[in-house]
Image: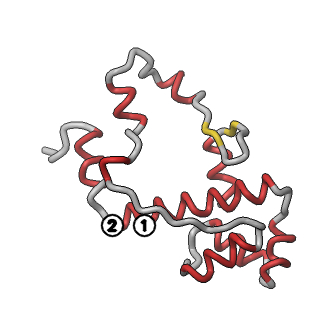
Amino acid sequence: MTKYQSFADIWAEVENDDTFWTEKNILDFTTKLFNLMEHRNISKKEWAERLGTSQAYITKIFRGNANFTMASMTKFVQSLDAKLEIQVVPKEEHVTQWFKVLKNSDQAKPTIMKNWQFETISGNNINPDNELEACA
């Protein structure tokens, strides 16, 4: 018999895993980089030239396989005419996950969830599947 009774039980365990939070932060950072590139109409090739590196390294960055340091993150962001800001917030201030919101909602139907849109930093709506695919 499984030790989990619900998805919320699984999520509660995941929320205590440092590896999960590390990977989430990498995904958040690389997604913001990609969105900023699109907002500035900068191609991977142009960004690689700005950084003095190869397009293969840019792909490595977007796959989350690069070893990010504060220095490299600052360099990436500045090369896109932006600045890096780090925030530390108490855990109780984080946003409620979508599945916890839907749990008590009449709209918790897969057909509705498939059509959800997320907002990028440029204010455009994109499909999250395309966003993740673009970062790969």
Name the side, left or right, on which 42 lies relative to 112: right
Q: Circle 1 sits in a helix, a strand or a loop, which is it?
A: helix
Q: Residues within 10 Å of mark 2 (few under 14, many from 20)?
A: few
x and y percent of residue 100 in the render? 34, 33
Q: Classify the position of the C terminus by image quarter.
A: bottom right
Could you tell me which residue is drawn at 72 percent across and 73 percent down? 78
Query: Which of the pair 89/123 is nearer the observer?
Result: 89
- Please name the residue that numbered disc 1 is placed on: 22
Name the side, left or right, on which 7 lies relative to 22: left
Per the model, the C-alpha gap separating discs 1 and 2 is 6 Å
x and y percent of residue 80 in the render? 77, 67
Could you tell me which residue is drawn at 39 percent across and 26 percent down? 102
Query: Which of the pair 39/21 is nearer the observer?
Result: 39
Number of numbered discs? 2
Confirm or deny contact between disc 1 and disc 2 (CB under 8 A). Answer: yes
Q: Which mark is residue 18?
A: 2
Query: Which of the pair 107/51 is nearer the observer?
Result: 51
